[in-house]
Amino acid sequence: MHDVTQPAKFKVRQLRAWFGDNEVLHGIDIDIEAKRLLAIIGPSGCGKSTFIRCLNRMHEMVPGARSSGDVAFDGVDIHGAQVDPVLLRRKVGMVFQTPNPFPTMSIRDNVLAGLRLTGRLNKARAAEVAEHALRDAALWDEVKDRLDKPGGGLSGGQQQRLCIARSLAVEPEVLLMDEPCSALDPVATARIEDLMHALKASYTIVVVTHNMQQAARVSDRTAFFLAGDLVEVSDTDTLFTQPRDLRTEDYITGKFG
């Protein structure tokens, strides 16, 4: 059963976003519940990736990009004067479409890179932290004997799990995943989907995906975006079997995409 008492990790109200004069999000209202997995679906260019980049203030790093509206993370306005964007991004981690490990850096150092960058690496605990993150990312058994080898030598699916381990090492509360399987083969995709299932017990996860079957398999709730609007959001089973909006039905039945 859907737990209606689940607290909101993010409360988003009237979020609008621009690249220069081009408005790409038009007043988004959504609550993102803690320790559940929200999938965001919709055709290319509908604002999915921009939306999740607004949640950890990565959108504003693009020259000419800006946003307005209210985004509260655990009740705190992420645009408030007291919020350090770097600390926010530590709590709200991002995994990108194309795996981006540091190719010449060792597997171990890849995992620890975020901690090292933020000056939080406890050298005495480094090996323990790396193992824990790699175990959480379901990669430990595959790499434990070659931790000193370059991260670039791993397969695509392993590289993506290495990037997830790097995100987990800094102990985030939220994982944003932007099309994390789109560059992977079906076997590697299945591994990442299994990993998402395991991680949502401990993390709030938001996954952007063009793959509706993936959304149906992994998510608790699904949001459908179209042309910068949030058309509807509901429990995944409901959205795929009884969508309220005809545009959602047309999209999930393949009338457009």
Image (tube, rainbow, N blue to C red):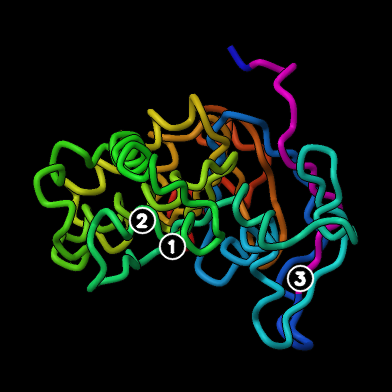
Marks 3 and 2, Cα distance to the nearest angstrom? Answer: 27 Å
Q: Which label's residue is closer to the chain start, 2 or 1?
A: 1
Depth check, front residue: 36 or 118:
118
| Vertical placement of residue 155 versus 164, above or below | below
Q: Is residue 243 visible?
A: yes
In the image, taking residue 126 as reference, residue 104 lies left or right, namely left
Residue to which mark 3 is pinned: 17
Q: Residues within 10 Å of mark 1 (few under 14, many from 20)?
A: some
Q: Characterize the magenta stretch by its predominant secondary structure.
A: strand
- SS class of the residue under badge 2? helix
Q: What's the residue at 50%, 54% (across, down)?
A: 208
Q: What's the residue at 58%, 11% (across, down)?
A: 1
The residue type indicated by label 1 comes to: Phe
| Vertical placement of residue 226 versus 9, above or below | below
Q: Residue furthest top?
A: 1
Q: Which mark is residue 41?
A: none
Q: Are marks 2 and 1 in contact (CB under 8 Å)?
A: yes
Depth check, front residue: 43 or 145:
145
The residue type indicated by label 2 comes to: Cys
In the image, taking residue 31 as reference, residue 167 lies left or right, namely left
- SS class of the residue under badge 1? loop
Circle nearer the viewer, 1 or 3: 1
| Vertical placement of residue 122 versus 9, above or below | below
Residue to which mark 1 is pinned: 96
Q: What's the residue at 44%, 42% (across, down)?
A: 215
Residue range in magenta is 3-17
Residue to which mark 2 is pinned: 163
